Amino acid sequence: MTQITGRMPSEDREKFGDYSAKVGLDGSSVATLLVLRELQLRRLHDLRARLGIPNNFTEKKITSHRVTEEQKTTFTKHAKDIGLSNSKALGLLCRAELIEQWVFGRLWSDSD
């Protein structure tokens, strides 16, 4: 297995850590879920248009562990096709998750 490292503003990274704890996972596990979801849904272009990339995206690191080399290669190509590095792409997915809270909804929905 390999990893993808992303960057995000300090404030977003702190919120992402709190959010991850709220769902009962570490930040890396949530980031990995977001990468895998993105490989299915291909939403980066829309997220970039909606949320933008903050100027201070390089402040703090988030790492998605436990992805295959093939998944990393596919993610890298997908990000590059819309003009993003892996770092910006993963940071953007994490920023979007703070708003959408998809993982929380999937893990803690009342419908199960």
Image (cartoon, helix red, strand yellow):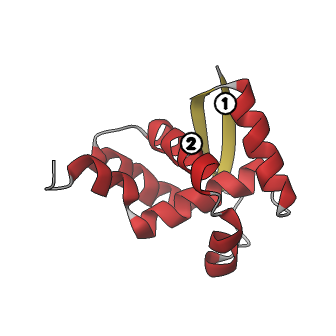
Q: Where is 51 relative to 65, above or below?
A: below
Q: Secondary structure at mark 1?
A: strand
At x 68% / y 37%, what residue is drawn? 4
| Mark seen at residue 3 | 1
Tell me residue 68's x, y (percent): 66, 25
Instruction: Inspect this view and state whether residue 23 appears.
Output: yes
Instruction: Inspect this view and state whether residue 11 appears.
Output: no
Tell me residue 58's x, y (percent): 72, 57
Q: Where is 1 relative to 12, above or below?
A: above
Question: What kind of residue is marked 2?
Answer: Leu
| Mark seen at residue 36 | 2
Tell me residue 104's x, y (percent): 31, 54
Left or right, residue 14 beside residue 10: left
Q: CA distance from mark 1 to mark 2?
A: 12 Å
- Residue 51 lies in quadrant: bottom right
At x 45% / y 55%, what residue is drawn? 16
Question: What kind of residue is marked 1?
Answer: Gln
Counting residues from the start of the chain, the first of labels 1 and 2 encountered is 1
- Residue 24 lies in quadrant: top left
